[in-house]
Image: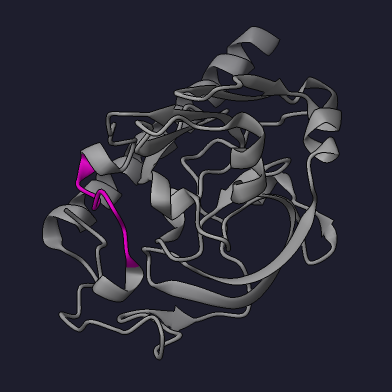
Amino acid sequence: MQKETEQVTASVAGWIREKLITRKQAWAEAKRLITGRVGARESDRLPPGQRLVNDWPVLDLGVQPFVPREQFRLIIDGLVETPTVLDWQGLLRLPQSDLVTDIHCVTAWSRFDNRWGGVRAIDLIAAVRPRTEARYVLFQSSDGYTTNVAREAFEDDDVILAHSWEGRPLDRRHGGPLRVVIPKLYFWKSAKWIRRVTFSAEDKPGFWEVRGYHNRGDPWAEERYG
């Protein structure tokens, strides 16, 4: 009976996932939410087509993996001088920082002044020392999700691998125990439940990028879709 229940649960989760994917691919094909306006990051805090929210909407692919801290591992590999596998204590031994940033979701909501705690990307980079030819950073998540950014986007001083939000541990719904936060790009680039960071000479579009989303994802240029 338990096995049958698990099979039904997995089937329902798979159906939800496929429905979400199909709907969002349709949005990409229709260029949904594109206003045609271009904003200036330096002066326009709210990018074109975005609306401000006070809550934090939960968006995922129908799966929210549970990663206990004692089982947590973060692999940093590829074109780096010091390939590394961090457990939770290893992560906490890296320099810890607090940052306040805005976030902008491709589904048109933005949330201002989010307070994060974690490891800034520049401190992770200092620890692993990427090679000169590493021009891209590829992310893999515990739910199978992938995404990609240019190295310079990851090296920005406001990028953080966050394990806390508003002074509390980042909860599972929002990507805990650890997620990437890249504030200057749409939030699908900020991978949840992060398990691997790979520095690469070649770009490799991720889950949404191969399904019609823009490869870079700048909110002020409305780079929602490719």
Q: Position of residue 217 (x, y in %)?
A: 31, 58
Q: Residue at x 79, y 40 (%)?
A: 94
Q: Specify whether residue 173 is painted magenta.
A: no
Would you say 134 lies left or right of 193 here?
A: left
Residue 46 seen in the current view: yes
Q: Residue at x 78, y 24 (%)?
A: 87
Residue 85 placement: quadrant: top right
Question: 168 and 10: which one is in front?
Answer: 168
Q: Specify whether residue 215 is painted magenta.
A: yes
Quarter placement of the N terminus: top right
Which residues make up the magenta segment?
A: 211-218
Q: Position of residue 159 (x, y in %)?
A: 57, 56
Question: 142 and 65: which one is in front?
Answer: 142
Q: Is residue 209 above or below residue 128?
A: below
The colour scheme is one colour
Residue 175 seen in the current view: no
Q: Is residue 205 above or below residue 158?
A: above
Question: 201 and 6: which one is in front?
Answer: 201
Q: Residue furthest front?
A: 132
Q: Position of residue 104 (x, y in %)?
A: 46, 69
